[in-house]
Image (spheres, grey):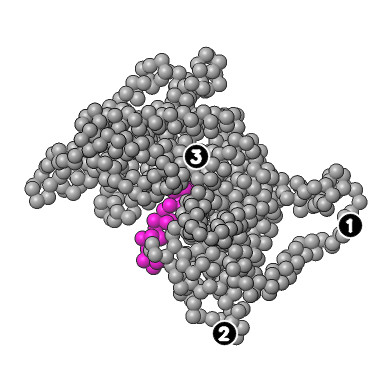
Amino acid sequence: MSDFIQHLINGIAAGTIYALIALGYTMVYGVLKLINFAHGDVMMVGVYFGYATAYQLGRAARTTLWGVLLIFLAAMAACALLGFIIERFAYRPLRDKPRLTALITAIGISFALSYGFQLDFGPLPGAAPRAFPEVIQPTEWLVLGDPDHPVVVWNWQVISLLIAAALMVTLQYLVFRTRFGRAMRAVSFDHRVAGLMGIPTDRVIALTFMLGSALAAGAGILYAIKDTAVQPLMGLYVGLKAFVAAVVGGIGHVPGAVVGALLLGLIEEFVVGYTASSWREAVAFGVLILVLLFKPEGLFGRVAAEKV
Amino acid sequence: MADSAATAAPARFALPLWARGVAPVAVALVALAVAQWLSARSPFFVYIASVVGVNCILAVSLNIVNGMTGQFSIGHAGFMAVGAYTSGKISQVLADTAISGVPEVASDQTMLLFSLLAGGTAAALFGFLVGLPSLRLRGDYLAIVTLGFGEIIRVIVQNTRALGAALGLSGIPQRSTLFMVWLWVFLTVLVARRIAHSSHGRSLWAIREDEVAAEAMGVDTTAYKVRSFVISSFFAGVAGGLFAHFIPIINPNSFGFVKSMEVVVMVVAGGLGSTTGAIVAAVALTLLPEGLRSGFTALGQGSDELVQKADQIRMPIYGLLLVVLMLARPQGLFGTRELWDVLPRWLPRRRKGVA
């Protein structure tokens, strides 16, 4: 029983991080109808920026609240800039071209980023995995059950849950309660008509990209703080999982992405917990195939008829 | 010009109808036999030519899905892995068995052919399983599903002791010959060309141009997409099988995302939908790194590091190449045209409307 609860907690903790990344996928898909393949790799770049900032700060400064905040903000700002550059120079020129061109471009960017970061000359980090500097001292936040077989809730799990929840609430507010959010939803609905109504579509799309990329950076650092090795290919796998989460929830649907991510985190944790950890990478793919077979529009997505 | 030639006087060397189908096969078989005989003393040449051949099969077969049908698969190496491990394992188990009553070479080649067919069939089966759910949906899903599939195959192999796990599968009899590799290149090209000009192929082009319109014209889009995907996977499996029979150890990392991307770059650079374009790009992109490597090695001191750097930088360059191609020349080298469509005027041209 305590095993079960422990898996439940770990699953939710993993799910919150997938949720943050999945939100970026879903937002970009919402406004552009483009699966941003490079999203996971943008996250990876963010993690490296956070890593560099943490080292610049030094051991004492990076464990303070302001230090942690600075690490997050630096990484998020860097990724927002990267997202802007990618959107401006790679996706915008192709917006009216066939969808396949944009998809190939996205794949190319993903490949260039993940393998570019494996090079080890100049400022590039090289392929060797490294541990993220300890910014949060891992402590047991809550210990439940009998002492021989306790259920442990770690403090970083609580912290990432809180940060993730805060970011999600902010996002929900932004999309549904602000002028920018309304513009975003209008562009998502039909970007040509939105443009005719006086909405600066280019600016809205660019901002959405920056927002999604910044979210990815935040999620990436939360993910890296845990125990994952920081390495250039991390974005590929996490990106894939977050995409699956977005599809499970119905791609383009914001709360759906969160639910899908939590579900995926739980499924993954339980499968791995009761079989072997080497199957972790296979779980998300299995879930994706099942969803595509039985409910391709996802849990909350609507079946959209393709219009000509 | 070419069109009027087709309607006007018959060609200079008109073959009887039955011979038109047989002639290329006969010519190819003779040419391959000669090539096999000539190259017998040069193992390095055979190796390079085999790698080029395998890449040609991969590129031409991927072109059926990515080029002709307009779906985007980026997990071709996954199917290659299925074929490589299936046929490699069969050959490894049957390494000491021989067909009695025939010379050793004939027995070996027959066994190789059998294991290649098994590998191709296994890959085709996986292609069906992966393609059916994802091809029912819009194209982007296929990209992610195939990417995931490639990674999953790698994970499964790494966890399977019988397939050598992470260390790789060794002890596969090295039976591959130049003849066999290029015979399959020929077959792949033949099938690709025949598909392109059949009514089946017309449906694929229609799907590529506009899926909704194709559906409205009565094309069963899912069925056609799945079929082309299965055919493409079959040849990827055969390519993997061939690869397994001339590389001493196959390990899961030879079939990773990098390999898939290599093939994608070949197809995109050659021109989505151009079979000869895929071949030209496959030959160029295989020989270029090999040439660079030999060049750096020949240059001498400090070369090891340099060779490694050149190898490393290849991957990000592939990525950037895709982006630049899409921005500057999205149709690739040839577009949907074939080599003979872009040859200079004074060279003999293939008559239109014959194939």
Pair 2/1: label in front: 1
In this view, B301 is above or below A110: below
Kindly check if marks 3 and 1 are in contact, taking CB atoms under 8 A apart as contact. Answer: no
Residue B57 as seen in the image, left or right of residue A69? right
Q: Which amino acid does label 3 sit on?
A: Ile
Give residue B166's quadrant in the image. Answer: bottom left
User: Tag 1, which secondary structure?
Assistant: loop
Q: Provide the residue designation for mark 2.
A: B100
Residue B158 as seen in the image, left or right of residue B111? left
The picture places residue B146, in percent across and down from the top left corner, at: 48, 48
Q: Is residue B211 visible?
A: no
Mark 3 surroundings: few (<14), some (14-19) or many (≥20) residues within 10 A: many
Magenta region includes residue B152: yes
Q: Distance between the residues labelled 2 and 1?
A: 49 Å
Magenta region includes residue A56: no
Q: Provide the residue designation for mark 1.
A: B12
User: Tag 3, which secondary structure?
Assistant: helix
Mark 2 surroundings: few (<14), some (14-19) or many (≥20) residues within 10 A: few
> At 33% across and 38% down in the image, what residue appears?
A52
User: Tag 2, which secondary structure?
Assistant: loop
Q: Which amino acid does label 1 sit on?
A: Arg
Q: What residue type is labelled 2?
A: Ser
Label 1 marks a residue whose chain is B
Kindly check if marks 2 and 1 are in contact, taking CB atoms under 8 A apart as contact. Answer: no
The picture places residue A59, in percent across and down from the top left corner, at: 22, 38
| Residue B304 vs residue B104, the one in the foreground | B304
| Residue B216 vs residue A64, the one in the foreground | A64
Q: Provide the residue designation for mark 3.
A: A109
Q: Which region of the structure is painted magenta?
A: B143-164
Tags 2 and 3 both on a single chain: no
